[in-house]
Amino acid sequence: MNWMDAYPKSQEPTLEQIEAFIASPLWNGLCSWAEGAYSIAPKVEYSTCSGAPGWNVKYKKGGRALCTLYPAAGQFTALVTIGAKEASEAELLLPMCSDYIRELFARTQPFNGARWLMIRVADERVLEDVKQLIHLRVPIKE
């Protein structure tokens, strides 16, 4: 079933329903990492954005977006924005990232000074890359 059909605007899903729909351990891996590392809670929001409409999960820290997660059956996409402030650090990180992330970064054109990376999190390597990119946006305070 399609995410938009399962949860239309009039029916906000719970975090448990989102997790069950995605049915991927990678989802739990990213959510528990973000919540633990940054001491934050997820926020379920509805977006009318034409690129990825529907319910999504946002993580923010100190007013900065860490990532927005877009559910799909059996998988999810993480939006991580790399701004001009993080660009040079991202360039240094890229050689250690998966081919998928390097190729995505290369073909994503900057928009308003930032690269809006829509990352399909399909394996553990990409999950770790997403964590590193989020860490560039907002460093974890020890």
Image (cartoon, helix red, strand yellow):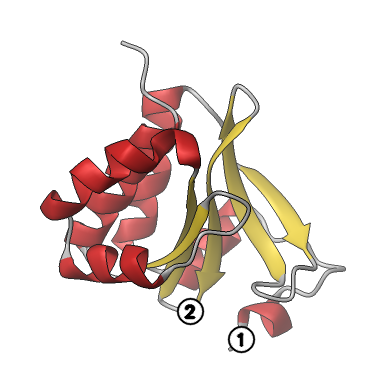
Mark 2 and 1 residues: CB-CB less than 8 Å, in contact? Answer: yes
* Mark 2 Cα-neighbour bin, 10 Å: few <14, some 14–19, many ≥20: some
Task: Give the quarter of the image for residue 2.
Answer: bottom right
For this orientation, the residue located farthest to the top is: 142
Q: Is residue 26 left or right of residue 95?
A: right
Residue 45 drawn at (x, y percent): 73, 53
Residue 12 drawn at (x, y percent): 76, 60
What residue appears at the point 39 percent right and 57 percent down from the top-left corner? 27
For this orientation, the residue located farthest to the right is: 10
For this orientation, the residue located farthest to the bottom is: 1
Please determine whether, in this image, residue 130 is positioned above or below residue 19: above
Residue assigned mark 1? 2
Quadrant containing the N terminus in the rendered view:
bottom right
In this orientation, which residue lies closer to the viewer: 88 or 140? Answer: 88
What type is the residue that disc 1 sits on?
Answer: Asn
Q: Which mark is residue 73?
A: 2
